[in-house]
Amino acid sequence: MSVIIQVSELHFSTADGIKVLEDIHLRVDRGEMIFLLGPAAAGKSVLLGLLAAQIPPQRGQILVHGRNIARLSRKKAFELRRRIGFLPQGFAPLPKTVLKNVMFKLRCLGNFQEQAEEKALAALERVRLTAKLATSATELEPLQRVRLGLALSICDEPQLLLLDEPFSNLDPGGRTEVCSLLAQIHLSGLTVLTATRGPLPTAADGHRVVLLADGRVKE
């Protein structure tokens, strides 16, 4: 099985010198579904931001899709980000309809109108949100909003999916639904790394769990 993420000796500190990540080593194989479990302020969001090439690395090596993130030009970093689906913590949709939210992203990524609509409809069908196409995204319930976030993350057919706290603000039933949906998306061949403070839904049973605490990872 080939490696999709390889992190070695990764360190990260805030501007005022507070250590967030310390000597992180992490390997993710293509096709894995992993949960990154840790308390609030453990550095989960920073780690995902580094993996998504959205935060510049400081020390250590990060290889994603075989590319060294620290050495990427701005153009190459953009190309890499297109191959990564990323759902940030506290995702807030645009004040547009559900369909137009997804189409707007795809158009910004260079898809033609017809192609964008086709991809948007396919993504929304995968997350079971087609009944809300014409609904304003700002009116969605929390679970439906997470579904929209997932659709936005997978709409341009990435190979790697990074999710930051997708279970927050959901009741136990909602967390189970989202986790089951992630498992279905994962079965299509997508590599999925989900950061959460927990507790993990039962649907996560059987999948790899990586603990992040005190700036270090443990398994």
Image (cartoon, rainbow, N blue to C red):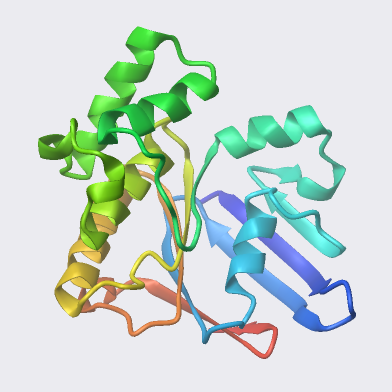
Q: Is residue 185 above or below residue 197?
A: above
Front in this rendered view, residue 157 or 130: 130
> x, y (%) of residue 68?
78, 46
Name the residue located 41 percent from the left edge and 40 percent from the top edge.
94
> x, y (%) of residue 78?
68, 33
Q: Is residue 81 above or below residue 183?
A: above
Name the residue located 74 percent from the left edge and 56 percent from the top edge.
62
Q: Is residue 151 above or below residue 47?
A: above
Instruction: Find residue 109 and report its image quarter.
Output: top right
Residue 182 is left or right of residue 215, and the answer is: left
> x, y (%) of residue 155?
38, 33
* In the image, farthest residue toward the left: 131
Residue 16 is left or right of residue 160, and the answer is: right
Residue 201 is left or right of residue 35, and the answer is: left
Front in this rendered view, residue 185 or 171: 171
Name the residue located 44 percent from the left edge and 55 percent from the top edge.
91
Name the residue located 36 percent from the left edge and 48 percent from the top edge.
149
Let me know if residue 147 appears in the view: no
Let me know if residue 178 appears in the view: yes
